[in-house]
């Protein structure tokens, strides 16, 4: 146990921050499991948002977040492709640039 007053305060703050970090970390793990299980766009979106929050709070490294988000986007794409209706897009005529 700390003896100095500032060390006692630091211990209290560290405990509070640890609890907050554990809540976010657990929510991220749960969201990732849900996204992998159901593979819906909404679940994937929630998992990506929690991943970004975890990076912002330095709970996970940004490269790990990129890896997670890439994996999640692969889950969402097959479902998104099934719902998207193909539209024909007319090509606009190209404008010629005037040379000076």
Image (cartoon, helix red, strand yellow):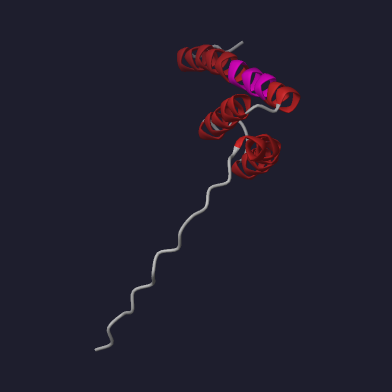
* Residue at x-position 60% and y-position 15%: 23
Residue at the right extreme of this rendering: 37
The image shows residue 95 at horizontal and vertical percentages of 34, 74
Query: Which residue is painted at 52% across and 11% down in the image?
Result: 12
> For residue 52: magenta?
no
**Quadrant occupied by the C terminus:** bottom left
Main secondary structure type of the part rendered in magenta: helix
Write the start and end of the magenta stretch as one range: 23-31
Q: Taking 16 as reference, is 51 above or below it?
A: below
In this view, the residue farthest toward the left is 100
Residue 70: give x, y in percent of width and height: 66, 43
Q: In which quadrant of the rendered view does residue 3 lie? A: top right
Nearest the viewer among 1 and 27 is: 27
x and y percentages locating residue 42 in the rendered image: 58, 25
Residue 26 inside the magenta-drawn segment: yes
Please identify the quarter of the rendering in which residue 76 is found.
top right
User: Residue at 56% of width from left, 35% of height from top?
Assistant: 55
Query: Left or right of 49: which side holds 99?
Result: left
The structure residue drawn at horizontal position 31% and vertical position 80%, both measured from the top left corner, is 97
Say whether residue 89 is left or right of residue 54: left
Establish if 15 lies above or below 51: above
- The residue nearer to you, when weighing 17 against 74, is 74
């Amino acid at each position: 146990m700390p003896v100095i007053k500032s060390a006692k305060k630091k211990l209290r703050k560290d405990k509070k921050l640890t609890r907050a970090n554990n809540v976010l970390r657990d929510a991220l793990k749960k969201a990732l499991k849900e996204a992998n299980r159901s593979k819906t766009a909404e679940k994937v979106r929630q998992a990506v948002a929690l991943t970004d929050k975890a990076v912002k709070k330095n709970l996970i490294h940004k490269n790990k977040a990129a890896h997670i988000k890439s994996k999640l986007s692969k889950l969402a794409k097959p479902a998104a492709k099934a719902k998207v209706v193909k539209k024909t897009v007319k090509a606009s005529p190209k404008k010629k640039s005037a040379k000076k």
